[in-house]
Image (cartoon, rainbow, N blue to C red):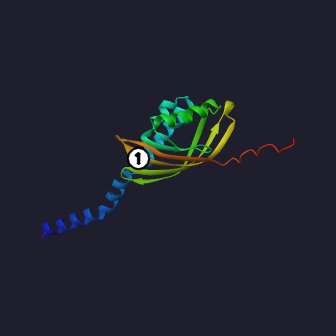
Amino acid sequence: MRKAAWLVITVAAVLAALPVLAHEAGAADDPRPAIEVAVEKWEQAFKSADPAALAALYTAEAWALPPGGEMVEGREAIGAVFREAMNMGVKEFALEIAEVRGGGDWAYEVGKYAGMGEGGKEVDRGKYIAIWKMDDGEWRIHRDIWNSSVAPVPPPAEGGE
């Protein structure tokens, strides 16, 4: 009788622990911590004026959809987009992650950005969505779209002023 009681207690304890174990296993699959690290690398690469390091954070088949420009494909073209921003005086970006969701080899991130120029002066701010893909054991950006929240400057009125 004692063996049966211990068996029932053991089975009950295992069954009671299953939801906790399942939650912990799911937490291990949460892409957010790894994506947060990758976002920090992205910010540092931009601040270091290293478009090649930025491009390496994207998949080889990545697309970027920059504001006011055409969609570009591939690491080299994406690096060129960021090189152009650097040449225009953008010194760094601060990214604020609002949400990361995903599972398996895919995740998405939604957030806000602020672009700073000389002396930390804000030159742009906006929002973005990035689709991340597990690529060779690392999370890399596969699709990236961002747009400014700053209203465009209207063209000068005809006839002066």
Is 82 situated left or right of 105 in this image?
right
Depicted 81 relative to depicted 29: above or below: above
Split into 4 quadrants, where in the image is the C terminus? Answer: top right
Question: Element under label 1?
Answer: strand
Residue at 60 percent across and 43 percent down: it is 69
The correct choice, above or below, for 155 with respect to 20 in the image is above
Q: Which of 75 and 121 is in front in this view?
A: 75
Amino acid at the residue labelled 1: Lys
Question: Measuring 51% from the left and 34% from the top, which residue is drawn there?
Answer: 79
Q: Position of residue 143 (x, y in %)?
A: 48, 47
Residue that appears at 65% across and 44% down:
125
Nearer the observer, 107 or 25 = 107
Residue occupying the far front of the picture: 159
Q: Where residue 56 appears, x then y in whole percent?
A: 44, 35
Q: Nearer the viewer, residue 84 or 37?
A: 84
**CA neighbours of label 1 inside 10 A, class few (<14), some (14 to 19), many (20+):** many
Q: How many marks?
A: 1
Q: In which quarter of the image is residue 60?
A: top left
**Residue occupied by mark 1:** 133
Which residue is painted at 36% across and 58% down in the image?
23
Q: In which quarter of the image is the N terminus?
A: bottom left
Q: From the viewer's perspective, is 122 left or right of 155? A: left
